[in-house]
Amino acid sequence: MIFDFLINIIDYKNKLKILNILKNKFNQNLINVIDIGGHKGETINFFLKNFNINKIYVFEPNQQLYETLIKKFTNQNSFIFNYGVGFQNEKKNFWHLGKKSLTL
């Protein structure tokens, strides 16, 4: 619990830095955003809250997290894919909580 709290503080400070850089560079308008590893939608929320977004492309290989993202963001210019992203077109084992859950 303390670890999560500390990570959130660090993450918040990093997000503020990123936000300032992006706002200085692009004002409030970003045409397209690609989120690789959508997790629970933290990055999607960040961009939707702070910018005018045309489209967000989200890649999330974990089936459960993918389904959560679909429920939360389907109507918000988001295109969500249940795939991992890498340098090669290949199948990989996906491990979740120490267990092999699927092959991508």
Image: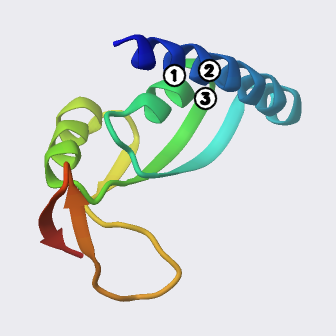
| Residue 20 falls in image quadrant | top right
Q: What amino acid does circle 1 point to?
A: Ile
Dot placed on the residue nearer the N-terminal end, 3 or 1: 1
Residue at image point 79% right, 26% down: 23
Name the colour scheme: rainbow
Please tell me which residue lies in front, 76 or 13. Answer: 13
Q: Are marks 1 and 2 in contact (CB under 8 Å)?
A: yes
What whole-number distance in Å separates the C-alpha atoms at marks 2 and 3? 25 Å
The circle drawn on residue 53 is none
**Disc number for residue 7:** 1
Residue under pointer 3: 52
* Residue 99 in the figure: left or right of residue 42: left
- Where does the image place residue 48, in percent across and percent down from the top left? 51, 26
Camera-nearest residue between 92 and 69? 92
- Residue type highlighted by circle 3: Asn
Q: Residue at x 43, y 19 (%)?
A: 3
**Left or right: 89 as drawn, with respect to 14:** left
Is 47 rendered above or below residue 74?
Answer: above
Q: Which mark is residue 10?
A: 2
Residue 99 picture location, percent across and down: 13, 59
